[in-house]
Image (spheres, rainbow, N blue to C red):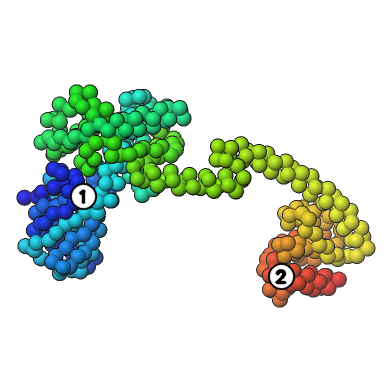
Amino acid sequence: MASERLYKADQYQVQNTAKVLEVTTKNGCDCIVCDRSVFFPEGGGQPSDIGTVSKGELIFNVLCAEDQSLEDDVWHITDAPEGTFKVGDEVELTIDWDSRFCNMQRHLGEHMLSGAFNNLFGGINRGFHMGEDYITIDIELDGRMLTEEELDLAERTVNEAIWADLPVSIDYFENYEASLVMPVRKQVPHDGEVSVVTVGELPDPYDCIACCGTHPSTSGQVGVVAIYKHEPNKGMNRIYFDCGIKAKEHLNENMKLLTEIANRNSCKTADLLHKLESDQDQAQQLKAQMARMATYIKETEKTEILAKLNEDKAVVYEQDLIAVDDLLKLGFAVIGETSDRFLALLHPETKTALLFSSGDEKCGALVKEHSAEFGGRGGGRDDNARAVFASEKDMRAFAEAVVKVVK
């Protein structure tokens, strides 16, 4: 005879005494089957209960509960060392109520939100996952994507039903055919016992769906459903959301973050978007202005560097008013107008030396041969190379050494 599942009769029962019927081991720890249990094994998209099992004064954790089918035994996977339990032992099983109730809130909230999409738009739930940080459902609408207005309507509708504190009932049927008397929104034929969860009063409930999970006795205990975002997924609408305490914690964290960002921007949270858009416009203007300044600096510096290269074969030149990438472009522009010349451009801010050659000097080889001597690293090609150093002093010493070699 399979384990008696006490949560089916009372989903608020947290503890029971039981007799061990079977023992096996997993990873050096005992796994036990009891004649009766309050533990819900993972199923229907809902995680299993966690909790404890005690034998006399010894207390061990139940890490999860498992089964093979709804009519099969419930296995309790514990952290008790192998050999702790034996058949016939009397034990006390206790679930973690906070975890159970959170799962109940989330599971019923998922039913009700899926029901809202079905009632409002004819959407069909094709997928459900209850994760640690959020829940997802995949709503099929014949390829159509939901609008933000429709998402808002569904969220408002489901929360109004939650706050109406509708009754929640669970009916059990011997088989799928017997369950067809219920007005379920989605029929999923399968073998064995069928449990149907109904929110509201028959014959016209808010929602009715087959499910083996645990659920609170009234919708008001869900508290709230909060939709976070949605995105396309295989032609369907993937909805990210959460319910109850999980949703409240998420919204609290987001509100704290929003308030902190608003405070840092010296504005109210309601004005934050306008402030960020204004800052973005200013940033784009500054970026354009900096680009013009960089162009001006490169043209000015190019003239000066070419003048120096007319007088000397090898020149070292420092510049950190522009970014290192702009300095690289400057180097190419300069060396492109010379022949048989060598240029070392130094960028003090990033401690970077850029080498350029329009003659026989091999820049990559020079970096490879001399940069390590000054604690640098880098590489490059014959016509250009770069090396990065730990200090400006090392950077300058490297450049001076290379110029001596070139001259």
Q: Secondary structure at mark 1?
A: loop
CA distance separating discs 2 and 1: 61 Å
Say which residue label 2 marks. 391
**In the depicted view, which residue is nearer to us: 236 or 64?**
64
**Residue type at the position of mark 2:** Ser
Q: Quadrant of the C terminus?
A: bottom right
Q: Residue furthest right?
A: 311
Q: Residue at x 16, y 68 (%)?
A: 57
Q: Is residue 316 above or below residue 115?
A: below
**Residue type at the position of mark 1:** Pro
Q: Residue furthest bottom?
A: 373
Q: Where residue 189 sits in the image (x, y, percent)?
A: 19, 33
Q: Residue at x 74, y 69 (%)?
A: 392
Q: Earlier in the sequence, mark 2 or mark 1?
A: 1
Q: Which mark is residue 224?
A: none
Q: Are marks 2 and 1 in contact (CB under 8 Å)?
A: no
Tell me the quarter of the picture where residue 171 sits: top left
* Figure label count: 2
Tell me the quarter of the picture where residue 83 sits: bottom left
Q: Secondary structure at mark 2?
A: loop
Left or right: 336, with 7 as reference point = right
Q: Is residue 219 visible?
A: yes
Q: Residue at x 24, y 51 (%)?
A: 97
Q: Is residue 67 visible?
A: no
Q: Where residue 257 sits in the image (x, y, percent)?
A: 51, 47
Are there few (<14), some (14-19), or many (20+) residues within 10 Å of tag 1?
A: many
Say which residue label 1 marks. 41
